[in-house]
Structure formats: structure tokens, C-alpha cells
Amino acid sequence: MKRNAVYPGTFDPITNGHHDLIKRAAGIFDRVVVAIAAHSTKTPLFGLEERVDLAQQVLHGIPNVQVVGYTGLTVEFARQNGLQVIVRGLRAVSDFEFEFQLATMSRHLMRDIETVFLTPQEQFTFISSSLVREIGMLGGEVSEFVHPVVQAALKQKREAEL
């Protein structure tokens, strides 16, 4: 039986921490779909198409990974695409409560879809998209946190706002 997973998020922008988790998930599952949420409670810096494009560029070397945008409930997206597992990242204990709530609600909504938590390598535990976005938009150095294409995109956004 094939095991297929979805790694959902806003990825605004995709970071080296995301890349690490996706690469490791790709070693565990037959197929990993990186599902980039179109609508969220956040106001993204990058539009959906930009986020999908950046993620595709960053992840292009991982053969069993697919990047798509989506709207609606993650569990419904997973069901419609034959994905049995939702992969979520936990950077710190502070992430656990929210992620536990999401996993429990997902199980309540769709009992046949499981949630699996992965923790990042130590050097990525403090990286978040929101911190990278803020540092990049204020002209700070983000090269150790993101792929060069993301760094260039952040620089371009910053220059467009100046």
C-alpha cells in the first residue's frame, strides 16, 4: 500500500526549515504534496502563485514532491487527492498546543487521515517564515535561512516597497 502525505502551510516564504522537513518526509512517504494555502488568517507578503513558484524552485530536486496551491479544508484536500497523512512541523514546545488542536480537529473531521509531527534539525528550530519575512523586508541578511531564489524574491519585494 502506498503512503502519500500532504505538508500544508502558507510558506510565506518557504524556508530552509521547511525544506529540511519536506526532504525528510519525502524519505518516509511515497509521495509528498506540499499544499500551499491560498486563504488563511494571515496576510501573505507573496501571492499564492509566487509562493507556489518559489516552493517549486526550492524543491525541484526532490523527485517525489509535488507543490500545489489549494483552498478550503486541509483534510478535504487530502481526501480528494488520496493523501492519508498530514505532516506538520514542530519547532518548539510552544508550537505543540496549536498543532495538537489542529491534529485533533482534523481527526474529528476525517477519521481516516492521520497527522504526523516532524521536528527540524537543531539549526532550523528558531526559523519561522514570519521572522524571515520581517528580517528580509527590513534589509537584514537572510541567506542562512532561505534558498537563494527566496532571498532574491524578498529583496525584490523590499525594493518594490521603497
Image (cartoon, helix red, strand yellow):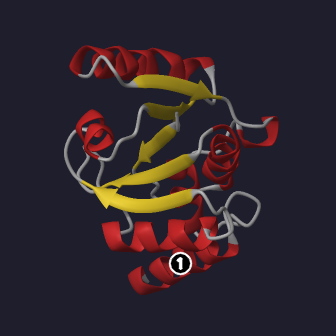
Circle 1: element type: helix
**Left or right: 57 with respect to 52?**
right
> Residue 33: where, in percent of width, then height?
46, 51
Which residue appears at 62% of the width and 70% of the height? 60
Q: Quadrant of residue 75?
A: top left
Which residue appears at 71% of the width and 66% of the height? 141
> Residue 162: where, in percent of width, then height?
43, 83
| Crowdedness near tag 1: few (<14), some (14–19) or many (≥20) residues, C-alpha within 10 Å | some
Q: Is residue 121 above or below residue 17?
A: above
- Residue assigned mark 1: 153
Which residue appears at 48% of the width and 40% of the height? 5
Q: Is residue 143 above or below residue 162?
A: above
Which residue appears at 42% of the width and 44% of the height? 8
> Residue 81: where, in percent of width, then height?
32, 47
**Left or right: 93 with respect to 67?**
right
Seen as rendered, the residue at the extreme front is: 1
In-front residue for pair 12/53 = 53
- Amino acid type at mark 1: Ala
Examine the rendering and report whether any part of residue 111 can be seen. Answer: yes
Q: Is residue 31 above or below residue 93?
A: below
> Residue 119: where, in percent of width, then height?
67, 30
Q: Is residue 96 above or below residue 48?
A: above
